[in-house]
C-alpha cells in the first residue's frame, strides 16, 4: 500500500508548495487588514467593502439585536441566486429565534449564466411563478388581495391590504447597493457572465421580469448571502458579528462602526456613532496575488477561468475551485516524466475535463479515509481499521467518481497519493479562510494579531463571539472548521479562538433575506 519513492518525492514537493507557514499566514492576515482599510476609505478597490445602508444598529454593542417580529409571524418569499442552484423559498419568521422554510431548487444552465441577462431574469421570474403555482397559488392569475380565502394566507397574514407578494432577492455577486431595494451589479463572479448586466439595477431587472409576466410579486429587498448568513445567525443564536460563506464562492459580511467607513463622508445624524453591515467581497482579496503563495496549478486554473486575475482569494478557497486545483495536480502526476506517478499513466473522464472534479469528491475521499459519513456504518472504527481497509474505500470512491472503467489501473498506493493531494489542497483553503476570519476579529477590535504589542483592551473582552457560516464546503468537508480553528489559534491566540462560536447559518440566504424584507417592510409602513 505504500507509495513509491518517486511518488513520495513528488508529494513532498506538492506539500512544500501548498503549505503556508504560520508567519506567512500572519502576513496574509495583515495584508487583508490593509486592503480592508483601503476598501473602507475609497471606492473602486478590489475588496469592495460595500456597506449595507439599511441594517443599521444604533446600539452601543455591535451584535445584531433580535429583530422584532411583533405579530404572530411574518412570511416572505425569498429568491436566492448566486451559486450552483437557484432557490425559491417561502420563509416564515416566528419571532422567537425560529423560522420555518419551504424551498424548491432550480438549475441554472450554462446558457442562462452566459446569455442575455433578460433571459436569466425571465427564468428567475418563471421559477417564482412555478413555485407559487406548485404551492396552489397561481400568482399570475389572481392578485393575492383578490385571491380566494386561504390562498396566499401566509403572505398576507400581517398585510391584508397588500396587492402583491413581498419578495427578498438574495443576489450574491458584488453589488453597489444604493437602497434596501436597489443596487447595481459591479461584476460577475463564480462562472456567471450574463450580458448587459453590469451597471444595471438588479432589483429593476427582476421587477421588470415579474411585471412583464404579470406576476404579482414585488421585490422589496436586495440582500447578499453573507449578509443573510449574518442576520439569520444573529436571529437564531442571539448575536453574531460575522457571516461567512464557504460554498461555490467565498465572502464575508461583518458589523462595522460607521465612523470607520470613511468613504461614506458626512453621514446623517441618525447613523452617526452607529454600526453598519459591511459586505467585504473578500473573494477579491489580493487580486494582485502578491501576498498569496501561488503554485503553477493555481496559475493554470486562473488562466483558464472566465475571470483571470479576479477573485484571487476565492480561487484558493471555495468549492467551485478546489476540485479543479486538485485535478491539475493529479494530472501533473499522471503526466510526469520520465515515468508516470499515478494510475500507470492512465486518466479518467472526470480528470480530462475542466471542472470535471467536483469538490464534493474531495469530501468523499476524506470521509472514506476517516471512516465517517456513509463509510461509518458497519465499517471498523477509524481506530480499528487498517490503512489498507481505509485505502480500499478511498479507491472505490476514486473509481466511481472519476469514472475509471478498469479498477486495476488504481493501486492502493495511487489511492493514497490522490487522498493526500486532495487533503493538501483543502488544508491550504481552510488555513487561508482563517486569515479572513482573524482579520475581521482584529478589525472589529476583538482580537490582536499574534506578536502584537498593543495593550488597549479588546472589544467585548471575555464575551462569546458569534460567527455564522454557510456553504457546502464548511458544512460537509470533514474537519474544515477544526482546521480553520487551528490556524485561528496561531493568528489570534488560544483565548480569543476559544470564545469564537462558529455555527452554521443554515438556510441563511432564505431566513436572512426574510429578515431584510421585514426591515424593508417596516421602513415602508
Ligand atoms: P452555493 O454556494 O451555490 O449556494 P453550496 O454551498 O452548496 O451552494 O456550494 C456549492 C459548491 O460546494 C460547489 O462548488 C460544490 O462543488 C461544492 N460542494 C458540494 N457538495 C460538497 C461537499 N460535500 N463537500 C465539499 N464541497 C461540496
Image (cartoon, rainbow, N blue to C red):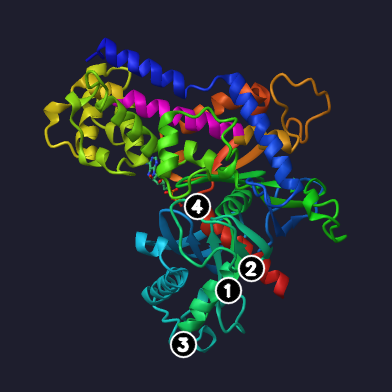
Instruction: Measure how far apart labels 4 and 1 are at the Cα level.
Output: 20 Å
Q: Does label 3 or label 4 sit earlier along the sequence?
A: 3
Magenta stretch?
A: 418-435
- Name the residue that disc number 3 marks: 142
Instruction: Measure how far apart labels 3 and 2 are at the Cα level.
Output: 27 Å
Q: Does label 3 or label 1 sit earlier along the sequence?
A: 3
Q: Is 271 rendered above or below residue 47?
A: below
Disc 1 and disc 2 in contact, CB within 8 angstroms: yes
Secondary structure state at the residue bearing disc 1: helix
- Name the residue that disc number 4 marks: 189
Instruction: Measure how far apart labels 1 and 2 are at the Cα level.
Output: 7 Å
In-front residue for pair 106/151: 106
Q: Is 447 rendered above or below residue 284?
A: above
Q: Is residue 298 magenta?
A: no
User: Is the residue marked by circle 1 packed among few (<14), some (14-19), or many (20+) residues within 10 Å?
Assistant: some
Instruction: Measure how far apart labels 3 and 1 are at the Cα level.
Output: 22 Å
- Name the residue that disc number 1 marks: 204
Is label 4 or label 2 in front? 4
Which label was assigned to residue 290?
Answer: none
Residue 289 position, x and y percent, is 56, 34
Q: Is 478 rendered above or below residue 267?
A: above
- Name the residue that disc number 2 marks: 182
Is label 3 or label 1 in front? 1
Tell me what residue is drawn at x 40 percent, y 65 percent: 115
Which of the 4 image quarters holds residue 353? top left
In-front residue for pair 468/326: 326
Secondary structure state at the residue bearing disc 4: loop
Q: Is mark 1 within 8 Å of ligand 1?
A: no
Q: Does label 4 or label 1 sit earlier along the sequence?
A: 4
Tell me what residue is drawn at x 58 percent, y 68 percent: 200
Amino acid at each position: 500500500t505504500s507509495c513509491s519513492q518517486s511518488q513520495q518525492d513528488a508529494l513532498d514537493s506538492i506539500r512544500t508548495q501548498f503549505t503556508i507557514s504560520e508567519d506567512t499566514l500572519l502576513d496574509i492576515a495583515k495584508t487583508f487588514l490593509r486592503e480592508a482599510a483601503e476598501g473602507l476609505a475609497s471606492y473602486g478597490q478590489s475588496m469592495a467593502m460595500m456597506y449595507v445602508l439599511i441594517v443599521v444598529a444604533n446600539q452601543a454593542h455591535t451584535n445584531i439585536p433580535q429583530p422584532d417580529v411583533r405579530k404572530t409571524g411574518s412570511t416572505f418569499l425569498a429568491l436566492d441566486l448566486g451559486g450552483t442552484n437557484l432557490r425559491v423559498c417561502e420563509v416564515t419568521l416566528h419571532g422567537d429565534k425560529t423560522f420555518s422554510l419551504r424551498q424548491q431548487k432550480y438549475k441554472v444552465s450554462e446558457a442562462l449564466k452566459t446569455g442575455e441577462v433578460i433571459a436569466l431574469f425571465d427564468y428567475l421570474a418563471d421559477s417564482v411563478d412555478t413555485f407559487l403555482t406548485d404551492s396552489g397559488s397561481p400568482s399570475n392569475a389572481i392578485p393575492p388581495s383578490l385571491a380566494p380565502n386561504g390562498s396566499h394566507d401566509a403572505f398576507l397574514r400581517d398585510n391584508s391590504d397588500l396587492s402583491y407578494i413581498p419578495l427578498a432577492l438574495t443576489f450574491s455577486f458584488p453589488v453597489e447597493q444604493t437602497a434596501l431595494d436597489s443596487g447595481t451589479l459591479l461584476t460577475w463572479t463564480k462562472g456567471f457572465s450574463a450580458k448587459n448586466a453590469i451597471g444595471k439595477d438588479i432589483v429593476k431587472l427582476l421587477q421588470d421580469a415579474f411585471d412583464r409576466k404579470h406576476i404579482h410579486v414585488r421585490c422589496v429587498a436586495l440582500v447578499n448571502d453573507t449578509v443573510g448568513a449574518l442576520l439569520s445567525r444573529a436571529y437564531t443564536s442571539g448575536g453574531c458579528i460575522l457571516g461567512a460563506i464557504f460554498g461555490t464562492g467565498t465572502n464575508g459580511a461583518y458589523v462595522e462602526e460607521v465612523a470607520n467607513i470613511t468613504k461614506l463622508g458626512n453621514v446623517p445624524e441618525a447613523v452617526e456613532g452607529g454600526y453598519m453591515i459591511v459586505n467585504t467581497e473578500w473573494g477579491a482579496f489580493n487580486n494582485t496575488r502578491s501576498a498569496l503563495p501561488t503554485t503553477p496549478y493555481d496559475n493554470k486554473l486562473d488562466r483558464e477561468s472566465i475571470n483571470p486575475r479576479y477573485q484571487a482569494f476565492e480561487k484558493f478557497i471555495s468549492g467551485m475551485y478546489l476540485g479543479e486545483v486538485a485535478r491539475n495536480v493529479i494530472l501533473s502526476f499522471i503526466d510526469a516524466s520520465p515515468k508516470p506517478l499515478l494510475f500507470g499513466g492512465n486518466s479518467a473522464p472526470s480528470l480530462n475535463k475542466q471542472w470535471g472534479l467536483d469538490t464534493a469528491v474531495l469530501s468523499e475521499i476524506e470521509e472514506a479515509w476517516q471512516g465517517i459519513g456513509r463509510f461509518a456504518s458497519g465499517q471498523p472504527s477509524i481506530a480499528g481499521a487498517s490503512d489498507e481497509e481505509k485505502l480500499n474505500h478511498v479507491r472505490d470512491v476514486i473509481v466511481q467518481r472519476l469514472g475509471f472503467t478498469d479498477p486495476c489501473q488504481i493501486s492502493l498506493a495511487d489511492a493514497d497519493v490522490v487522498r493526500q493531494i486532495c487533503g493538501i489542497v483543502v488544508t491550504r483553503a481552510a488555513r487561508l479562510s482563517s486569515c479572513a476570519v482573524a482579520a475581521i476579529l482584529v478589525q472589529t477590535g476583538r482580537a490582536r494579531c499574534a506578536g502584537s504589542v498593543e495593550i488597549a483592551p479588546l472589544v467585548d473582552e471575555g464575551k462569546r463571539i458569534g460567527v455564522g457560516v454557510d456553504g457546502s464546503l464548511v458544512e460537509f468537508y470533514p474537519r474544515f472548521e477544526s482546521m480553520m480553528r487551528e490556524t485561528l489559534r496561531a493568528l489570534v491566540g488560544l483565548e480569543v479562538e476559544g470564545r469564537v462560536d462558529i455555527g452554521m447559518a443554515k438556510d441563511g440566504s432564505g431566513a436572512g433575506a426574510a429578515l431584510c424584507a421585514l426591515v424593508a417592510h417596516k421602513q415602508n409602513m
